[in-house]
Image: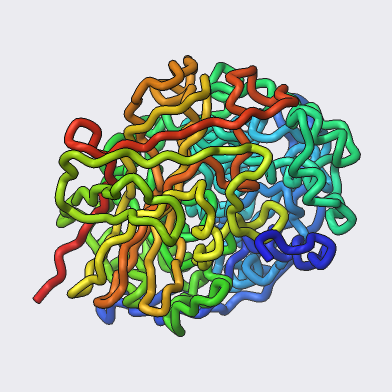
Amino acid sequence: MILKAFSCLKKTFIIKRIFFFLFLCGSLIFFANPQSQEASKPVFSVKTEFDVKVPLRDGVFLSADIYRPEEEGKYPAILSLTPYGNHSNPKTAIFFAERGYVFIIVDCRGRHDSEGEFYPLIHEAEDGYDVQEWVGKQPWCDRNIGTIGGSYGGWTQWLPAPLGNPHLKTMIPLVAPPDPFYNIPYQYGALMPTSIFWAFFVNGHSNQNLESLNIDKILKHLPLITMDEALGFKSKVWKDWVSHSRYDDYWKKQSYQDKYHLVKVPILHISGWYDDDQPGTTMNYVGMRKNGGSEEARQNQKLIMGPWPHSVNSTSKLGDIDFGPTAIIDLNNLFLRWYDRWLKGIKNGVDEEPKVDIFVMGENKWRKESDWPLPQTVYTKFYFHSKGSANSLFGDGSLSTSPPKKEPPDTFIYDPENPVPFITSPGFAQIGGPDDYRAIERRDDVLVYTSDFLEEDLEVTGPVVVKLYASSSAKDTDFTAKLLDVFPSGYAMRLCDGIVRARFRESLENPSLIEPGRVYEYTIDCWSTSNLFRKGHRIRVEISSSAFPKFDRNSNTGAPLGTEMKFQKATQTVYHSQIYPSHIILPVIPRKE
């Protein structure tokens, strides 16, 4: 079943997935430098203090749970701000307190035991700075602070970082989303309807119960701006999100990726190939390497990308695909090495190692690299071909490195009333995985371009982009792209995908409708992957105009987004000729002999 019944999703499961974004444990083979100084040892008893009130500049008090060595003294601090509850999973906090750190977990403004009203992202910069300032002045702190957190807890690190608190010495953001209009709740102008469930979950001080929701009905509700009411609550946040359907000042005030030059600390970036917030991690690593606010910062960025979902390091198996026993690593010891180096000054060699650790799927092995994107990358164009009938798995679409010459275009009808499904579990904690798309590829509104069987292994590691030449009968529409690894058995495993909303083809700030029948060049960012296409496998690209419910359905009317009540069909034409050479650009990594 493409969309599983939401009623079977237990509240405890959802909460565990959310909390896992912040506190991540596992089991990695840890290779320490034998000449390095020893890591911090678990020699301390732990003292806990709950619901400690932290004052902010506007008089609001946040609630902090503090885990610190019982022995009096000054210690470096590890700080986490979270909307998901500072009382959750204390094991990570105790792990660090036993090793001579003070671990502080703080409820975001308006969440759980903290005062105020929660509104996503608006207060996190100043609130984060104020909490850092308070922690740095406590008698148990040696004035050295590192931050940590996953998902929203990545935002709570990045937003205050440009303010430059002098106590902040390093950060570990896991699965940190990029600026909000580039991923969530919008991805390049396309709204992600499942965001409504997150807005509901964090509505008010306590976590809301999701198990009674009729997810199918809610996701199909129109207009989008009243989805909150269909769900059963009224949300200013949701209405603001839908009302601001372009990258305007509302979103710019919540952004941080234009401020790398103000961030001057070493950062450990962690994400997974199937993390649905993945682009933030790679964008932030590259941005800090190029534009970080100090030479030390630029030189001391570290990137780790595993075969993981949003709950990084939580499983080695996603759906039917098992990435093997080395897929799970020991994150706590990885964190400890990082903090020992940048908070305690222990010379453990972490700053002398290669800057990038990647897990190559297909080969199912970890590999160290000098930078990201990989310097040895050969960006290779794979062109679309057909005789005009690439529709479905049974069509004549093909993929090769040979440029097209004179070929007829492919056409399909995009009907928003019957969108192409995106395979995903319900809710908001994880959007898709290495799923088998053969059933979806039976549809005529999916163009399928497949390579010949590979005669040798081919590694693709890095950012994936589609250049699409297409026209539409509509004033506005969407085009989607997906990269897949086709096994000899026929299993069509999704690797990565993306979308472009036609009105945002040139600018997210100043959208413009398209002229029906006119050919435009569209760039579809499919994010990044690392996959070894084995000998005997095939490379496949899908092109369509919907991926529901990952993205909202474009009405094709050109009406203001979020207010549409009516749909119309659109005739889509995809060109692959000498003049309009539609293709995918794959980051091919030459294999070492």
Q: Is residue 304 above or below residue 244?
A: below
Q: Is residue 146 visible?
A: no
Front in this rendered view, residue 35 or 253: 253
Front in this rendered view, residue 531 or 390: 390
Identified at 79% across, 35% down, the residue is 227
Q: Residue furthest bottom?
A: 325
The image shows residue 554 at horizontal and vertical percentages of 60, 32
The image shows residue 265 at horizontal and vertical percentages of 39, 44
The image shows residue 299 at horizontal and vertical percentages of 26, 48
Quadrant containing the C terminus is: bottom left
Query: Left or right of 405: which side holds 304?
Result: right
Query: Left or right of 442: which side holds 211?
Result: right
Q: Is residue 321 above or below residue 116?
A: below
Front in this rendered view, residue 307 or 130: 307
Query: Left or right of 146: which side holds 237?
Result: right
Q: Quadrant of residue 1?
A: bottom right
The image shows residue 551 at horizontal and vertical percentages of 60, 42
